[in-house]
Image (cartoon, grey):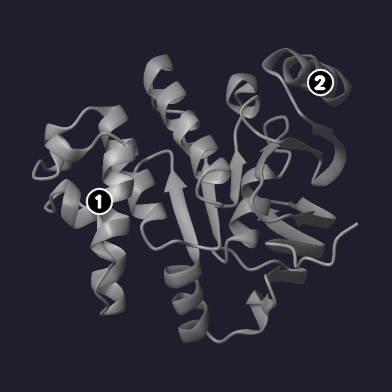
Amino acid sequence: MTNETAAVTAARLTKTFDSGDTLVRALDGVSVEFRPRRFSAIMGPSGSGKSTLMHCLAGLDRPGDGEVMLGGTSLWTLDDDALTEVRRDRIGFIFQGFNLLPTLTAYENITLPFVLAGKRGDPDIVDAVVDALGLGERLHHRPSQLSGGQQQRVACARALVTEPDVVFADEPTGALDSRSSRELLAFLRHGVDALGRTVVMVTHDPVAAGYADEVLFLADGRIVDTMSDPTAETVLDHMKALEEVAV
């Protein structure tokens, strides 16, 4: 056992959505801890609550009840300004849709968090991330001039240059071809192993989950199982079993 503070902790998270005549319980008392310097994947059938859980963990969506701790900071006791500052300075986001600003160059998109914070980023860190992702020759291109894989690598660089406590990735390979997916996942793995980052990824892809240290399985808004040292094959078998139960 270790006394090391968890990177992210969720305690008794609940979240419901109004769906016409009924309330949908997206999260049903979820409690989970993500350790520092680990690559964790969240998986589950469609509608299991995996994206809702990530959004609550990342401070993007407020749970109906429960608590989220980022290190020693209770996210949902913060006011809006303080929460915005925490998301900007301590959390990195990688989204399936890239979320790049079309009028900015790749370099300007990568360094945008520093502009928003009114800070000057460490050029050595920016250069190291850019080099690791192979973006050196694309820094002056705008998103429309980049391939999907290149755009996702820019989004990944933007999430990492601030040296966040946790990087959250929501289906980061969903819009990529297999080669670009492997490159991005290998870099996330490198970020954990070599740079000491903590990564929490939502994915539906067993191959992507195979890059993680552990997989958290959700069904009907609840954690139903976990798996250490996953492989694409073991994750696929587990997902098939969950989907058969759901049917």
Residue 203 vertical placement versus 5 (above, below): above
Q: Position of residue 232 (x, y in %)?
A: 68, 17
Q: Is residue 130 left or right of residue 46?
A: left
Q: Which residue is mark 2?
A: 238
- Cα distance, mark 2 to mark 1? 40 Å
Q: Name the residue: 48% across, 29% down.
A: 186
Q: Is label 2 in a helix, a strand or a loop?
A: helix
**Front-lying residue, 131 or 113:** 131
Residue type at mark 2 is His
- Farthest residue to the left: give it: 140
- In this figure, what is the number of numbered marks? 2
Badge 2 or badge 1: first in the primary sequence: 1
**Front-lying residue, 87 or 136:** 136
One can see residue 71 in this view: yes
Residue 198 vertical placement versus 170 (above, below): below
**Front-lying residue, 150 or 128:** 128
Decide: few, some or many residues near mark 1? Use Cα within 10 Å; few <14, some 14-19, many ≥20.
Answer: some
One can see residue 99 in this view: no
Q: Position of residue 1 (x, y in %)?
A: 91, 57
Q: Is label 1 in a helix, a strand or a loop?
A: helix
Q: Name the residue: 67% across, 70% down.
A: 71
Q: Position of residue 128 (x, y in %)?
A: 31, 48
Q: Is residue 181 left or right of residue 39?
A: left
Q: Name the residue: 60% across, 33% down.
A: 203
* Label of residue 127 in the image: 1
Quadrant housing residue 108: bottom left
Residue type at mark 1 is Asp
